[in-house]
Image: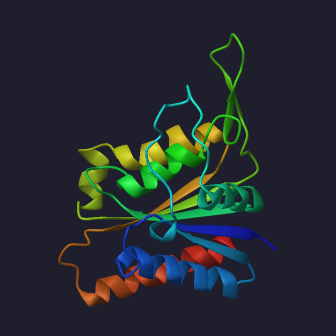
Amino acid sequence: MKKILVILGHPRKDSLCGALAAAYAEAARAAGAELRELTLADLAFDPVLRTGYGGEQPLEPDLAAAQQAILWADHLAFVYPTWWGGLPALLKGFVDRVFLPGFAFKYRKDSPWWDRLLTGRSARLLVTMDTPPWYYRWVYRMPGHNQMRRTILEYCGIRPVRISQFGRVKGSPATQRAKWLEAARRAGREDA
């Protein structure tokens, strides 16, 4: 049985991202996956990495529990919007505070290389955007997708990372949103 952790990175649970996360989770659970869910808006933590990696900033209990949930999972599903081409501040702060050296990766002494400490896990990104997806890809070159996939998750050993994108959200009709919810369900079944 696959163990999936669904992480909702939108600051509002009553958003399209919240509905996509619920649809994904419901389908994955129905397909036999064991599921846990993290709603970042409900966690109590300082999203600012106050001293970078040079000082100590103890993890709040919610972040320590989040690290344990990540270690428990075989697969991570992140659901979030694209704002200003990238991750919302809440999700970026979560990543900064949780994916730390010694937990997600480890620098090697006197070497430019590092050890990936979260290998053996896969991920899916379910990402909404107001930018038309073709424009995000060909004009902007997908900065948020690349950041999350390559410079965060794959850097820590999580692969493959699949991306399901939903856009253009602004002005989208209910029929389109229903199709996106079905796509999230399909992704949940595939990942289970």
Q: Residue at x 23, y 60 (%)?
A: 131
Report which quarter residue 141 is drawn in: top left
Say if 115 sits above or below 127 in the image: above
Q: Residue at x 39, y 84 (%)?
A: 179
Of the 4 image quadrants, the one containing the N terminus is bottom right
Say if 61 sits above or below 11 in the image: above
Query: Count the marks: how many?
Result: 0
Where residue 177 appears, as percent x and y from the top left, is: 33, 83
Residue farthest to the left, as pictured? 171
In the image, taking residue 126 as reference, residue 142 lies left or right, namely left
Residue in the foreground of this view, choosing between 140 and 8: 8
Of the 4 image quadrants, the one containing the C terminus is bottom right
Where residue 2 appears, as percent x and y from the top left, is: 77, 70
Say if 112 sits above or below 103 in the image: above
Residue farthest to the top, as pictured? 110
Q: Residue at x 69, y 76 (%)?
A: 35
Where residue 7 appears, as percent x and y from the top left, is: 55, 66
Q: Residue at x 67, y 13 (%)?
A: 111
Where residue 77 appears, as percent x and y from the top left, is: 57, 65
Say if 2 sits above or below 138 in the image: below
**What colour-coding does the image apply?**
rainbow
In the image, taking residue 32 as reference, residue 185 lies left or right, namely left
